[in-house]
Amino acid sequence: MYAHLHNHIHPYDVFTREKLYLEWLVFIGKKTQQICFCFGFRRRQELELEEEEEEEGKCRKQKQETETTTTTTMMDFSSRIQIIPIISTFVFFLLFSTLFPAVSARQFEDFGRLNQTFRPGEEAKKMRLIRTHLMKINKPSVKSIQSPDGDVMECVLIHQQPAFDHPKLKGTKPMDPPERPNGYHHSGTELENYQLWSLSGESCPEGTIPIRRTTEQDILRASSLQRFGRKIPKSIRRDSINYVGHEHAVASVSGDQYYGAKASINVWDPKVTDRFEFSLSQLWVISGSFTDDLNTVEVGWQVSQELYGDNYPRLFTYWTSDAYQATGCYNLLCSGFIQTNNKIAVGAAISPSSSYNGGQFDISIMIWKDPKHGNWWLEFGSGVLVGYWPASLFTHLRDHASMVQFGGEVVNSQASGSHTSTEMGSGHFSGEGFGKAAYVRNMQVVDWDNSLIPPSNLLVVADNPNCYDITGGINNVWGNYIYFGGPGKNPRCP
């Protein structure tokens, strides 16, 4: 049978098969490079010209040898047929072995670089990274609640929330509520009226917490996947948390050891003119050296198109233990803050907000350090605990705070070459007073004895008073208070 086959194989057919193998090898190599390009990976360059010429030389030599051989034994033919696939397979293996180490080494390239130029492969890689991150922070839920503002709140089992992904918190359980500070009194509106999502009439079951669902669009609005949900690292000035591109109007107290703070913060919906800017009102609890080991816990309301995609004022939390460099995040967008409440959604829209020369609305916020376990607890509204920052997250704040601040902050990106028109507070200066300017009232700090007391030596500071200013005062009803804010760009703030 084999001899019969041999007698009917023309020498040129042998050459044709060999040449087809070689052409197939080059074709597969080029296609492999194209496939790798489409997936955004580092590509090998095309074969060098001399390598191609060498391959062609081999083909010519092989053709000559074949044409001068009129008869071939079955052994010779079998050898020829077998060697070519073996060599082809070996070269093909080498090609892939040089390509795929580059894939694994580059698979977590900076997300921001992928966003610079549209390439189908890089776009596909970026979306894979985004979806992987979404799977990490969007935990399985037992119930979903649609909010009137378009948000979706997922009811997540309390022990499955993102906080417990933190290496220092894995395997732990939420702590029991601590003792409130001495001198604490309930005040404010009923809790259920504070957030838009609760207007649906639905709530999360006991044993779960509401977490705002993060979408692909939320992440795509960020400058990079690495920076999503985080503040930009800043160079910080000691007298107020001031850094390039950010402007503040704050009341600050320092010079002692502080174990918490409490205040009622007026809620507005200021105009934010650039998607990478924000406007907020909050309180800061601060400790550290104001360089690379600053510790903060922060709570308030914020309007941020980049983070939320709209202009609603939203309850937010933040923490860092290294001056905003690698640790911490907003809300529950990373592991850290442990939520214990099933009725408050951190990151959800606050309703109602205040109106100029009309109704005024404020939210009560208290942060204090549990004397027994050292964790920093958050209360929002009328006596309802939201959750806590474990002491293990921090260095300096494991012990106490060295500064407390109350007030407002905006980002001034100067995108148009002049000062931003993003508003702080109501968008009006402090001198206009109640009903027109934003305020923070009943400002207190917690001392070493776990007692709420008025702050002493309160200092008011505005980074750029022609754009946003601040005025402080004290009376029997509001205790220590401030008015603050401004329109940003104006004739005195070009």
Image (cartoon, rainbow, N blue to C red):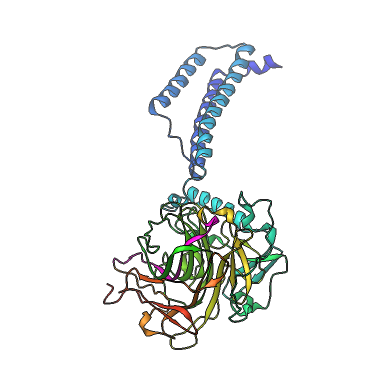
Q: Which residues are magenta?
A: 397-417
Residue 132, above or below 198: above
- Residue 491: x and y in percent read 26, 77
Identify the image quadrant of the N terminus. top right
User: Going by the picture, which residue comes out furthest to the bottom?
Assistant: 358
Horizontal side of 22 relative to 249 (left or right) equals: right
The correct choice, above or below, for 351 with respect to 450 in the image is below
For the image, the number of numbered tags is: 0
**Viewer-proximal residue among 2 and 22:** 22
- In which quadrant of the rendered image does the C terminus lie? bottom left
The answer to whether residue 22 is seen in the rendering is yes
Residue 335 in view in this figure: no
Location of residue 211 (image quadrant): bottom right
Q: Is residue 42 above or below residue 466?
A: above
Would you say residue 195 sits in the magenta stretch?
Answer: no
Spot occupied by residue 98 in the image (x, y as percentages of width and height) = 51, 31
410 in the magenta segment: yes
Question: Horizontally, is 160 left or right of 399 in the view?
Answer: right
Left or right, 172 with respect to 132, comes to: right
Vertical comparison of 268 with 212: above or below: below
Q: Which residue is at a point 38% across and 28% down the rendered structure image? A: 49
Report the front residue among 206 and 311.
206
Q: Please state the horizontal and vertical placement of residue 319, each as a whole percent of the image.
A: 52, 59
Point out residue 233 in the picture as x, y percentages from the top left corner: 42, 55
